[in-house]
Amino acid sequence: MATAKKVKLQRGSPDMGIFSVEVSVGRIYGGPLTTVPATVDTGAVDSMFPASLLTGLDVAPIERRGYFVDDGREVEYDVGMALINIDGREWHCPVIFGPENQYLLGATTLEIFNLVVDPTVGELLPRKVYVRPI
Protein backbone atom coordinates (compact mmCIF):
# COMPACT_ATOMS: atom_id res chain seq x y z
CA MET A 1 0.00 0.00 0.00
CA ALA A 2 1.38 3.43 -0.95
CA THR A 3 2.00 5.77 1.95
CA ALA A 4 1.12 9.44 1.70
CA LYS A 5 4.10 11.73 1.91
CA LYS A 6 4.78 15.44 1.69
CA VAL A 7 4.32 16.89 -1.79
CA LYS A 8 6.22 20.10 -2.50
CA LEU A 9 4.00 22.80 -3.94
CA GLN A 10 5.10 25.42 -6.44
CA ARG A 11 4.48 28.89 -5.07
CA GLY A 12 2.61 31.17 -7.43
CA SER A 13 3.00 34.91 -7.49
CA PRO A 14 4.82 36.16 -4.39
CA ASP A 15 1.95 38.63 -3.92
CA MET A 16 -0.65 35.90 -3.57
CA GLY A 17 -1.15 32.81 -1.43
CA ILE A 18 -1.50 30.54 -4.44
CA PHE A 19 0.13 27.14 -4.71
CA SER A 20 0.25 24.61 -7.48
CA VAL A 21 1.25 20.98 -7.64
CA GLU A 22 1.86 18.71 -10.60
CA VAL A 23 -0.87 16.12 -11.06
CA SER A 24 -1.56 13.59 -13.76
CA VAL A 25 -5.08 13.12 -15.06
CA GLY A 26 -6.55 10.31 -17.14
CA ARG A 27 -9.41 7.96 -17.81
CA ILE A 28 -10.24 5.68 -14.88
CA TYR A 29 -10.38 2.56 -17.06
CA GLY A 30 -6.89 2.94 -18.52
CA GLY A 31 -5.25 5.03 -21.15
CA PRO A 32 -2.69 7.80 -21.12
CA LEU A 33 -2.25 10.23 -18.26
CA THR A 34 -1.44 13.88 -18.88
CA THR A 35 0.62 15.80 -16.32
CA VAL A 36 -0.43 19.39 -15.63
CA PRO A 37 0.20 21.98 -12.92
CA ALA A 38 -2.97 22.44 -10.86
CA THR A 39 -3.69 25.26 -8.44
CA VAL A 40 -4.57 23.94 -4.99
CA ASP A 41 -7.89 25.55 -4.07
CA THR A 42 -9.31 24.38 -0.73
CA GLY A 43 -12.30 26.66 -1.32
CA ALA A 44 -13.31 24.67 -4.40
CA VAL A 45 -15.28 21.51 -3.73
CA ASP A 46 -14.37 19.51 -6.84
CA SER A 47 -11.26 19.57 -9.00
CA MET A 48 -11.56 21.31 -12.38
CA PHE A 49 -9.71 20.73 -15.62
CA PRO A 50 -10.38 22.06 -19.12
CA ALA A 51 -13.21 20.20 -20.84
CA SER A 52 -10.97 19.86 -23.92
CA LEU A 53 -8.31 18.04 -21.86
CA LEU A 54 -10.79 15.67 -20.20
CA THR A 55 -12.61 14.94 -23.47
CA GLY A 56 -9.26 14.32 -25.19
CA LEU A 57 -8.44 11.75 -22.50
CA ASP A 58 -11.83 10.02 -23.04
CA VAL A 59 -13.12 11.06 -19.62
CA ALA A 60 -16.90 11.06 -19.99
CA PRO A 61 -19.34 13.41 -18.25
CA ILE A 62 -21.75 11.65 -15.90
CA GLU A 63 -24.06 14.53 -15.01
CA ARG A 64 -24.41 18.30 -15.05
CA ARG A 65 -24.18 20.19 -11.72
CA GLY A 66 -24.65 23.74 -10.55
CA TYR A 67 -21.84 25.59 -8.77
CA PHE A 68 -21.61 29.05 -7.26
CA VAL A 69 -18.63 31.18 -8.29
CA ASP A 70 -16.91 33.98 -6.36
CA ASP A 71 -19.06 36.75 -7.82
CA GLY A 72 -22.25 35.03 -6.64
CA ARG A 73 -23.37 33.66 -10.02
CA GLU A 74 -24.49 30.08 -10.36
CA VAL A 75 -22.99 28.23 -13.31
CA GLU A 76 -23.44 24.69 -14.59
CA TYR A 77 -20.68 22.33 -15.61
CA ASP A 78 -20.48 18.72 -16.70
CA VAL A 79 -18.93 16.45 -14.05
CA GLY A 80 -17.29 13.05 -14.47
CA MET A 81 -14.80 10.75 -12.79
CA ALA A 82 -11.10 10.74 -13.66
CA LEU A 83 -7.98 8.99 -12.45
CA ILE A 84 -5.76 11.51 -10.68
CA ASN A 85 -2.15 10.80 -9.79
CA ILE A 86 -0.37 12.89 -7.17
CA ASP A 87 3.21 11.95 -6.43
CA GLY A 88 2.77 8.34 -7.54
CA ARG A 89 -0.54 7.72 -5.75
CA GLU A 90 -3.68 7.25 -7.84
CA TRP A 91 -7.37 7.62 -6.97
CA HIS A 92 -10.63 8.04 -8.85
CA CYS A 93 -11.91 11.57 -8.25
CA PRO A 94 -14.82 13.73 -9.42
CA VAL A 95 -13.74 16.36 -11.95
CA ILE A 96 -15.48 19.36 -13.45
CA PHE A 97 -15.28 19.89 -17.22
CA GLY A 98 -14.19 23.51 -16.98
CA PRO A 99 -13.09 26.33 -19.24
CA GLU A 100 -9.65 26.46 -20.85
CA ASN A 101 -6.75 27.28 -18.53
CA GLN A 102 -8.65 26.15 -15.42
CA TYR A 103 -6.58 23.58 -13.54
CA LEU A 104 -7.82 23.42 -9.95
CA LEU A 105 -7.28 20.77 -7.31
CA GLY A 106 -10.29 20.94 -5.01
CA ALA A 107 -11.10 19.85 -1.47
CA THR A 108 -12.77 16.58 -2.49
CA THR A 109 -9.61 15.39 -4.22
CA LEU A 110 -7.49 16.43 -1.23
CA GLU A 111 -9.84 14.48 1.06
CA ILE A 112 -9.71 11.39 -1.16
CA PHE A 113 -5.89 11.52 -1.06
CA ASN A 114 -5.90 12.28 2.73
CA LEU A 115 -3.91 15.47 2.17
CA VAL A 116 -4.01 18.86 3.85
CA VAL A 117 -2.40 22.12 2.74
CA ASP A 118 0.34 23.79 4.75
CA PRO A 119 0.59 27.19 3.03
CA THR A 120 3.36 28.39 5.34
CA VAL A 121 5.87 25.98 3.81
CA GLY A 122 4.10 25.28 0.53
CA GLU A 123 3.43 21.57 0.98
CA LEU A 124 0.63 19.07 0.81
CA LEU A 125 0.91 16.97 3.94
CA PRO A 126 -0.60 13.62 4.89
CA ARG A 127 -3.70 14.17 7.00
CA LYS A 128 -3.81 12.35 10.31
CA VAL A 129 -6.88 10.16 10.35
CA TYR A 130 -8.28 9.09 13.68
CA VAL A 131 -10.60 6.15 14.19
CA ARG A 132 -12.61 5.29 17.23
CA PRO A 133 -12.96 1.62 18.17
CA ILE A 134 -16.52 0.46 18.51
Image (cartoon, grey):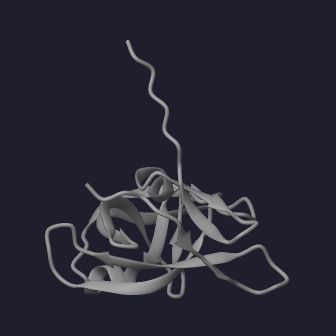
Count how many numbered circles sit on residues in the image. Answer: 0
Identify the image quadrant of residue 28.
bottom left
- What residue is drawn where x is 54% and y is 80%? 102
Q: Which residue appears at 56% of the width and 59% of the height?
A: 125
Q: Is residue 7 left or right of residue 118?
A: left
**Residue 99 located left or right of residue 69:** left
Q: Residue furthest right?
A: 15
Residue name at image x 40 percent, y 17 percent: 133
Q: Which one is nearer the viewer's eye here, 51 or 94?
A: 94
Residue at the top extreme, as displayed? 134
Q: Position of residue 59 (x, y in %)?
A: 25, 73
> Which of the 4 image quarters holds residue 43?
bottom right
Q: Which quadrant does the N terminus fall into?
A: bottom left
Q: Is residue 74 above or below residue 12?
A: above
Position of residue 134 relative to residue 84, above or below, is: above
User: Picture quarter containing residue 57?
Assistant: bottom left
Residue 2: image x %, image y %? Answer: 30, 59
**Residue 51 image point, x, y percent:** 39, 80
**120 in relation to 116, above or below:** below
* Residue lying at 48% horizontally and 50% vertically, measured from the top left: 111
Residue 48: x and y in percent read 48, 70
Q: Quadrant of the C terminus?
A: top left
